[in-house]
Amino acid sequence: MSEQIVARHWLAHLTPKAAPALATSTVLILARIWNANGAEHSIGNAVLMTALSLAAATAGACATIGRAGDPVIAGTAFAASGALAFAGVAGYTDALPLPLLLWSVATAGAYTLAARYWRTDRREHGAHQRHVSERREEHAHIERVETIRGTTQIEVARTGAAYAEQLAQALITRAALPGFDSTALERAGLPELPTATGIKEP
């Protein structure tokens, strides 16, 4: 059971790393299939792919202009422009070395761009983990302080109850002593302690 969990964890880490290579390889395979089905030396298809690539590049440039520019949209548009240009060249040419060269360049560029986002993601994830750890330690400290405070209050209450019980026992014991006279205490000027039977009603 633990081996399956480790395998899923390993695949979860591998998949994002392999995504750029899978993307460029997919474009290359589709372009060569298109080449075998009539795109080789086809001027019309080359013009179409060039126009689409330029349109995507223009959309990416527009997405970066102004304060409302979205870097995600811009990056997607530029990636689509590069993929279209790569597919057009790989579909138009007859030899395989040029498409393979473009594939290697595109793959290297994709990994270069992806590495930047991976570093940013790692920094954000690390900062989030530190924040969560600090909050957890802060809550644990507060819980420890509250636990100590509650324990102290319980001990104080127990001490007061023990004192009251000892006082009551002392009063009972004093009243049971032979020859005890409360009036003698009053004549001596000492205050009379309450009796064990309770306080007299007025």
Image (spheres, rainbow, N blue to C red):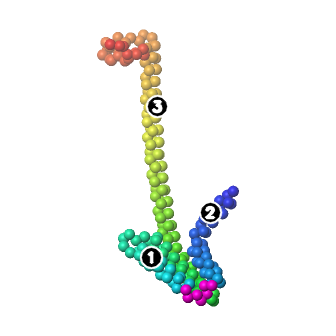
Indicate the position of residue 93 as horizontal and vertical percent values.
60, 88
Indicate the position of residue 34 as horizontal and vertical percent values.
62, 81
Q: Nearer the viewer, residue 6 or 51?
A: 51
Q: Nearer the viewer, residue 59 or 150?
A: 59
Q: Are marks 3 and 2 in contact (CB under 8 Å)?
A: no
Q: Is residue 174 visible?
A: no
- The residue tagged with tag 3: helix, strand or loop? helix
Q: Amino acid at mark 3?
A: Arg
Indicate the position of residue 111 as horizontal and vertical percent values.
54, 76
Left or right: residue 145 versus residue 16 is: left
Q: Nearer the viewer, residue 60 or 134?
A: 60
Q: Residue at x 43, y 34 (%)?
A: 156
- The residue tagged with tag 1: helix, strand or loop? helix
Which residue position is annotated with label 3?
Answer: 158
Indicate the position of residue 121 as horizontal and vertical percent values.
50, 67
Q: Which residues are magenta?
A: 38-44
Q: Amino acid at mark 2?
A: His
Q: Image height check: is 16 above or below 160?
A: below
As for residue 141 lying within the magenta part, the answer is no
Q: Residue at x 53, y 83 (%)?
A: 48
Q: How many marks?
A: 3
Q: Image height check: is 189 above or below 131?
A: above
Residue 196 numbered tag:
none
Which residue position is annotated with label 2?
Answer: 9
Q: Earlier in the sequence, mark 2 or mark 1?
A: 2
Between label 3 and label 2, give the one nearer the viewer.
Answer: 2
Between label 2 and label 1, give the one nearer the viewer.
Answer: 1
Label 2 to label 1: alpha-carbon separation: 37 Å
Q: Is residue 71 visible?
A: yes
